[in-house]
Image: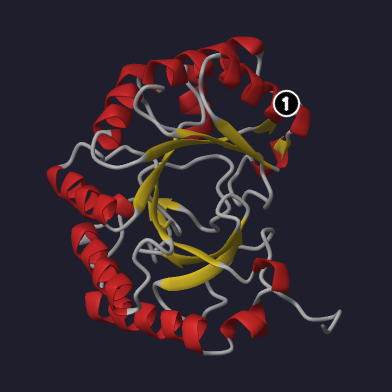
Amino acid sequence: MNASKQYLSIYDHSRELSGLKYIYSVVSRRAGGLSIGINLNVNSACNWQCIYCEVPNLTRGSPPPIELNVLENELRFFLHEIMHGDYMVDNVAEEDRHLKDIAFSGNGEPTSAEEFLETILIVKNLVDEFKLLNKIKIRLITNGSLIHKKSVLEAIKVLAKINGEVWFKVDAASEESIQKINQVNLKTEQIIDRLKLCSEICPTFVQTCIFTIDNKEPTQKEIDAYINLVKKAKKNIKGVLLYGIARPSMQPMAGRLGRISIDVLKNIAEQLKNNGVVSTVSY
């Protein structure tokens, strides 16, 4: 192997590397290999503004209309390159050459696209076309804020039929902490209700980013509130994905954020375990 070869890395999730409008690829810590990303928010607009977000020029809002034919053609092309071309050899380190999932993620909240259901149906058709059903996961990475919308629920029902799962963002539990981290007004009860609604129709994991602010770790009070929230949903969810910051924030508070100790993540994982919740740690 060429030692100077630059492969995809967990430390760089640039959407521009593929040269395509909606489709990109990353090596994902939590997925454990190559992930094909679908970025519906090409204008870098999101209805949240998390302080650790790696997206440059993030703005509040929703995506422009999705060019469904472009998305379909790009995803078909990309899958062909990965399955039958040299993409893996040219761009992915040998140990990561496993296609793990197709993930709706990108530069904002994917469910805010008016055509979200149609994009799920496109993925369903291509998964069938490339005979990938039950060989890879189809993942929705979401802040859960629009889960209650009828069209979003219909899309998640389709997702469940194609080996899908939802990674549902919960970074904090108190209203104060949610406002500080995600910069939205949200009550704990709303999170729990939406988690239950989602998990009733599709396997759902809580995903949580933990980091320091001004060199301070989350307080035990904040951790306790988080554990209590997860406990209330534990009968519904499949588990918790804990992770720290791997790539720098592009938001105004970036300079105040730091990487958390892995011991803190493991400690939270242990507390979750003691409360009957399965969790994994990605550092």
Q: Residue furthest bottom?
A: 85
Vertical side of 41 occupied by 248: above or below: above
Give whichever of 44, 18 is nearer the camera: 18
Vertical side of 191 occupied by 282: above or below: below
Q: Which x, y percent locates residue 10?
A: 67, 59
**Secondary structure type for disc 1:** helix
Which quarter of the rendering shows the C terminus? top right
Which quarter of the rendering shows the N terminus? bottom right
Q: Which x, y percent locates residue 278?
A: 53, 28
Vertical side of 24 occupied by 56: above or below: above
Q: Mark 1: few, some, or many residues within 10 Å (few <14, many ≥20)?
A: some
Quadrant assignment, res 28: bottom right
Give whichever of 34, 63 is nearer the camera: 34
Question: Which residue occupies 83% across, 84% down?
Answer: 2
Q: In the image, what residue type sits under mark 1?
A: Val
Taking the image as shown, residue 103 lies to the left or right of residue 18, namely left
Question: Which residue occupies 73% across, 28% down?
Answer: 214
Q: Residue furthest left?
A: 150
Question: Which residue occupies 63% across, 48% down?
Answer: 249
Q: Is residue 114 visible?
A: no
Q: Which x, y percent locates residue 60?
A: 38, 48
Question: Which residue occupies 24% across, 48% down?
Answer: 156
Taking the image as shown, residue 203 lies to the left or right of residue 269, namely left
Taking the image as shown, residue 164 lies to the left or right of residue 59, namely left
Q: How many marks?
A: 1
Taking the image as shown, residue 59 lies to the left or right of residue 217, namely left
Q: Which residue is mark 1?
A: 264
Q: Is residue 50 visible?
A: yes
Q: Which x, y percent locates residue 82?
A: 51, 81
